[in-house]
Amino acid sequence: MKCLLISSESAEVLFHWTDPEFQQNVQEQYGASQEDGQGLPAFEDSISTLFAPIIISCSTMVDRLGDSYTSFTTENNHIYVLHQFDECLYIAVNGDGEEDEGDLRRKIYVMKKMIEVMFGMVTLSSSLLRKELRPQDTEQRARLWKHLQSLLETYSHLRENDQSFLVEAVERLIHPTLCEQCIEFLERRLVQQLNSSVERAGEEVLHAFILVHTKLLAFYSSRNASTLSTSDLLALIIMAQNMYPSNIDLDDSNPEDIDSTSGSGPESFYTPEPSPRDGDSSSSADMPVRGSTPVFEFVDPDVQMAEDSLHTLDVPPPDPSTPRRVFLEVSLKDGLYPMMPHSMYCLPLWPGITLVLLTKIPTSAVAMSVYTFLEAFAKLEKRLSEGMEGSAATRGQPTIHDVRNKLDKFIKALGPSEMKCTQLQHVWTEFKSRIARGGSGFNRDLIQSCKNMKTQLCGIYRQCFLIESGPADIPRRLSPGLQERAQTMVQDKLMDWKDFLLVKSKRNITMVSYPVSKLILLPVMSSFNLTYLEDFPGLIHFICVDRSTGQMIAPSLNITERNTSELGKGPLAHFIKSKVWSLVSTTRRYLQKGYSTVTLRDGDFYFCYFLWFENETGYKLEAGDIPVLPDDSAPIGMLAWDYYRKLLRYYSKNHQGEVVKCYELLTVHLGVIPTEVILQHCRQLASKLWEPSRNPLL
């Protein structure tokens, strides 16, 4: 039983997601309380009633104590995790024992991240965000919630099955020659032609990348583009997978065929079946055949009514020619600008292979100005809240005086015809008059004026980048014809490689299985020309992550019920996979407590985890103290909260003038291997994995 809820302080539901078990439990609980002859209450009303005592209790504690609880466990072992972001309360629940507090907290932060990518700086205004998450139009609200629910389900599925989302790092396909060719193709042909076309309607392609399932085949950024952060890239992969989900449950039949991915052995390719669209509720195998005998079922009318109400939430398949507005971090010479507007074009090439284009929209400079003003008012509000006198706060805040002239010009450039601009002009005039008046109560009034200014600025941002103005906005995107040409160009380039890539994505770095009775599972990574059977006997699995670039490398972990995978078949394969997932969770708990090295024995296995720092030349730097985080801190990772970026800044304070890099290595060995041999393996493995001569693209 799982649930995630976003609520306002007044217990108004802003978003909810539940699995079928939780939904059935709620309907049974509140359906039983209805009088005879009445149908089930609306599910939204039921879930609001269910959580109202918790929401009110949390708000009361914040008002009276200035603090609140972050988690609790009920008598029936249901875990509740709560987190307040401004005026929005996030509540995650698990009642089946599959998730702990850390998992639920991570889910909350990932949901917040996806909302930021979708709504940008509107998330900085609670009142505006509430309107976005809960539109008055019922159909619009149903579509939005269905989309958010689908994104959450996609993320949860990827985290349970994909190592890159387990450790929150990007995995690249290991084929240097093809990767280099594709990057060169994106740079010299695709992006150049798109940006020189008159059909781009003022948009400029900044980033272009090719995904094979969730793995990155090639990535190119134009010269004037900012570096795309790992957090944003992972969020975009989730969105791409949500639009065109991979059929990852299918696998090639024999593990012996994986030799074809390394260029040796017989060629055997696999092409998955077309992925279902978002609107498909069942596979074609479950659809009745015309003329076949109908099947009748007797269904409870109340249950049928509830199911029928869910069908109204179905979202039609996405239109590839319609871009999605996404808000991503931009790093420029003059500073860091979060949540800048981009257009995301997700163009399917074949099932499992997708081309993604990120473009800069013509009015993006407005967003940069809005963020600059928001930052200035936020700093002034903070200084006033800390007790500094209003006049002293403004004198000690030179940016306010600089912003004054810029904001006047900004409002004038927007034009007086916009209603939001008129409201902004009114609030700004009132703000300036209060600064001029001063007097008693100056601080309190000015704090409220700062809040009003931030709300109005977020309103301008919302009007410019989130609200469709109608037919006038249609030409302001890459034309469908231009998108089709881009799609065709990449398809022509990869036509001879597509089957290979689909197999390669499942066997990126392979592991071969030996007789289960002997429990000898040794990885073979022919892409690196390493002989693991001779060099690393007893090594079962590893994950190595370059946290400076946000990229990871690991042998494949494909688990299927009907086919034999590299880890064997059936219970053994699932057992080892569960051990790897458990190891990652354990190491994060130790890292949160300040430990950079973990070694532990678990039955027949020996686990190791190392985090270390190197300089540009590869010289290992001395280990330093790692900050200890509180139990209710943001989860360690790079998707929801980039812990490693902050860790690198923290560590680099003592290494001024040096480029510091951060690495992680997790290994699983057989327990019979001596400890000193295991540690030697880890050192050798770490040094060989990132040698430029072996894999220049990592």
Image (cartoon, helix red, strand yellow):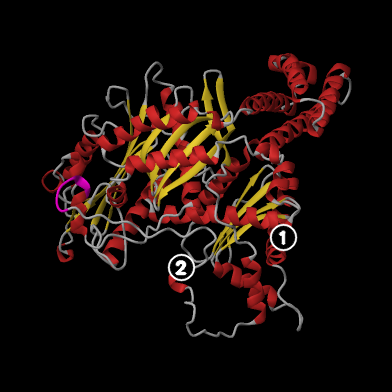
Residue 34 locus on image (x, y percent): 74, 78
Q: Main secondary structure of the magenta part?
A: loop
Name the element at disc 1.
helix
Q: Position of residue 116 (x, y in %)?
A: 60, 41
Residue at 78%, 25% (x, y): give it: 415
What's the residue at 16%, 60% (across, down)?
514
Residue 157: image quadrant is bottom left
Q: Which residue is mark 2?
A: 283
Q: Which residue is mark 1?
A: 52
User: Which residue range is magenta in the image?
Assistant: 261-266
Say which of 318 and 691 sits in front.
Answer: 318
Residue 201 showing in the rendered view: yes
The N terminus lies in quadrant? bottom right
Q: Residue at x 71, y 41 (%)?
A: 470
- Lower position in the chain sequence, tag 2 or tag 1: 1
Taking the image as shown, residue 543 lies to the left or right of residue 386, namely left
The quarter in which the C terminus is drawn is top left
Label 2's element? loop
> Going by the image, does 298 lie left or right of 523?
right
**Residue 262 among those drawn in magenta:** yes
